[in-house]
Image (tube, grey):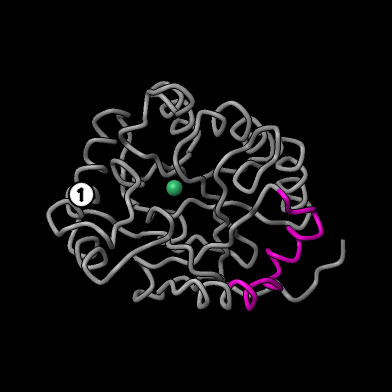
Amino acid sequence: MKPFCSRNSRDVRILCYHRVRSPRSYLSVEPEDFEAQIKHLAGLGYESLTLEGFFSGHAKPRSVVITFDDGYADNFEQAYPILKNYGFTASIFCITEKMNSPGFLNRSQIQAMARDGFEFGSHTLNHPHLPELDGETKKREILESGVRLKTLSGVDVRYFCYPYGQYDRESLAILRDSYYRGACSNRPGPNRPGLEKDRFLLRRTEISGYDQLEDFDLKISGAYDALHRLLHAVRGRP
Ligand SMILES: [Zn+2]
């Protein structure tokens, strides 16, 4: 497939997935589609980075960060073998209170992936709308979740992801003043390595279960960024 536009910059796109399973839905990508997308990236010469790799300056002209939100068990059962097969890695954001419950990742699955270089981050304790919480609860959801996830899983937790992509000034201040090294939002577009002001507002490109390979190719080329920016503005997201 011919690239839609130049990808030869050092900007890094962070892809946002939730589930890999049948049947497809907005949040569930069919395993065959997921494999075709990873194969496509590998064919274009992409390699995947964790957020730690991104912030450590390991980004190359064709680097991508693959993230999963919520910590579903299908990330281990379906996505992990495919990613491993292509030498790819991923960063998975778990809802701490869901961990070890049916349908969600458990300790041994997380540890197996971590041994292969996968990275785990916090997606709060209970997946609330952070801007609606009082200060103390917000703090607990952000700070306690990472500590508890580390205790429950036995792996380091250095990154955070806002539920529903929603954040406010207070959440940002809590994160900037904490042990976290960065946070993913749902703001569209690529990320420039070294841009400190965006460390806690990393941009992501959402991949839906309804994306055809052509759509996926356009998304990684940036062709959907303007449309996504417009949608975010209409929804009133910061
Ligand atoms: Zn979520």
Which of 45/145 is in front? Answer: 145
| Residue that appears at 39% across and 23% down | 101
| Residue that appears at 35% across and 52% down | 159
| Residue that appears at 70% across and 42% down | 34
Q: Is residue 37 magenta?
A: no
Regarding mark 1 in the picture, which secondary structure is present there? helix
Q: Is residue 223 magenta?
A: yes
Residue range corresponding to the magenta coloring: 210-228
Q: Is residue 2 above or below residue 75?
A: below
Q: Quadrant of the N terminus?
A: bottom right
The image position of residue 231, as x and y in percent, is 57, 73
How many discs mark residues in the rendered view? 1
The image position of residue 9, as x and y in percent, is 63, 75
Q: Residues within 10 Å of mark 1 (few under 14, many from 20)?
A: many
State the image quarter where residue 88 is shown: top right
Say which amino acid is labelled 1.
Answer: Leu
| Residue that appears at 57% across and 48% down | 17
Q: Is residue 39 above or below residue 231?
A: above
Which of 60/105 is in front? Answer: 105
The image position of residue 36, as x and y in percent, is 78, 44
Q: Could you tell me what secondary structure mostly forms the magenta stretch?
A: helix
In this image, 119 relative to 210: left or right? left
